[in-house]
Amino acid sequence: MKVTNLLMLPDNRQLAYAEYGDPDGHPVLYFHGGGNCRLEPLLLGNEAFTQLGLRLIAPDRPGIGRSDFRPNRGFSDWTKDVSFLADALGIANSQ
């Protein structure tokens, strides 16, 4: 489990994310709700994800936690950030 990872995005913003569970497990992207951050899955416990064989990846949304904010970005821009993260982690084609 590593709760703070930083990825530099193409527009020079940082995207923070955490990984929980089995590093070799099935990758699952987890998106926190409002008012929370990449640490939210800690409430469920790392052990549960490991037992299920999951590699849970929880990015901070822009401007939340350690992820940089950039004004004038819309919701569709967030999907580009997530796609870049998936590519960087080698999980873009996982099902």
Image: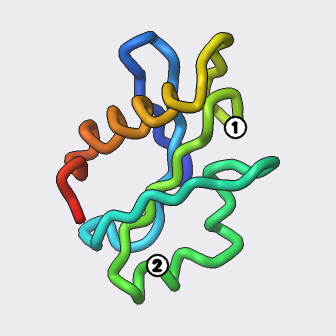
Dot 1 amino acid type: Gly
Give the residue displayed 34% in from the left and 38% down from the top.
Answer: 83
Tell me the quarter of the picture where residue 73 sits: top right
Marking on residue 65: 1
> How many marks on residues?
2
Q: Is residue 53 left or right of residue 33?
A: left
Residue at 44 percent across and 58 percent down: it is 29
Instruction: Kindly identify the residue that appears in the image at 69 percent across and 28 percent down.
Output: 63
Residue at image mark 2: 49
User: Disc 2 residue type?
Assistant: Phe
Q: Position of residue 78 (x, y in %)?
A: 51, 32
Q: Is residue 89 placed above or below 58 in the rendered structure? A: above
Which quarter of the picture shows residue 45? bottom right
Q: Is residue 20 left or right of residue 33?
A: left
The Cα atoms of the two marked residues, 2 and 1, are separated by 22 Å
Q: Earlier in the sequence, mark 2 or mark 1?
A: 2
- For mark 1, give the secondary structure: loop
Between residues 41 and 1, which one lies in front from this camera angle?
A: 41
Q: Position of residue 48 (x, y in %)?
A: 51, 84
In this rendering, position of residue 56 left or right of residue 64: left
Relative to 5, residue 68 above or below? above
Mark on residue 56?
Answer: none
Q: Residue at x 52, y 53 (%)?
A: 58
Quadrant (top left/top right/bottom left/bottom right) for the C terminus: bottom left
39 to 46, vertically: above or below? above
